[in-house]
């Protein structure tokens, strides 16, 4: 029996690696949503309509990914 066989989720470092990215997911999703919204606003000449929509969609997507990473399989 190898060390770590009794722990099906891996070791402590595997768990740290899994959850270390959670702090980056939300800001990255928000940034991507705003960037896409900015591009659409610039392209179509609208005000900041799509930036706000991108902010909302990016925030929702970020929280969804955090939920999936924390409570998923």
Image (spheres, rainbow, N blue to C red):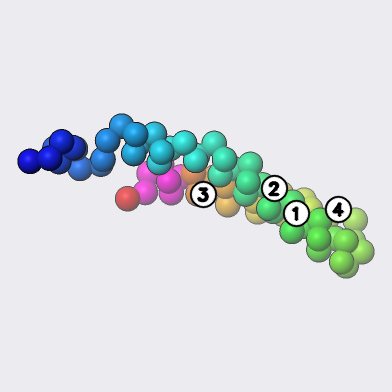
Residue 56, visible in the rendered structure: no
Between the residue at mark 2 and the residue at mark 1, the CA separation in whole angstroms equals: 6 Å
The residue nearer to you, when weighing 29 against 16, is 16
Between the residue at mark 3 and the residue at mark 4, the CA separation in whole angstroms equals: 24 Å
Between the residue at mark 4 and the residue at mark 1, the CA separation in whole angstroms equals: 11 Å
- Which residue is labeled 4 in the image? 48
Mark 2 touches mark 1? (CB < 8 Å): yes
For label 2, count other residues whose C-alpha is less than 10 Å away and answer few (under 14), some (14-19) or many (20+). some
Earlier in the chain: of badge 2 and badge 3, it is: 2
Query: Which quarter of the rendering shows the N terminus?
Result: top left
Give left or right: position of 43 versus 29: right
For the record, the magenta segment spans 67-72
- Labelled disc at residue 31: 2
Mark 2 touches mark 4? (CB < 8 Å): no
Between the residue at mark 2 and the residue at mark 4, the CA separation in whole angstroms equals: 15 Å
Residue at position x 54%, y 36% from top? 23
Q: Position of residue 21 (x, y in %)?
A: 49, 40
* Mark 4: secondary structure: loop
Q: Nearer the viewer, mark 2 or mark 3?
A: 2
Q: Magenta segment, principal secondary structure?
A: helix
- Labelled disc at residue 35: 1
């Amino acid at each position: 029996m190898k060390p770590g066989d009794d722990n099906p989720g891996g070791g402590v470092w595997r768990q740290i690696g899994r959850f270390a990215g959670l702090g980056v997911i939300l800001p990255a999703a928000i940034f991507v949503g705003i960037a896409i919204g900015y591009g659409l606003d610039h392209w179509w000449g609208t005000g900041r309509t799509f930036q706000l929509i991108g902010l909302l969609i990016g925030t929702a997507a970020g929280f969804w990914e955090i939920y999936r990473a924390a409570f998923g399989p």
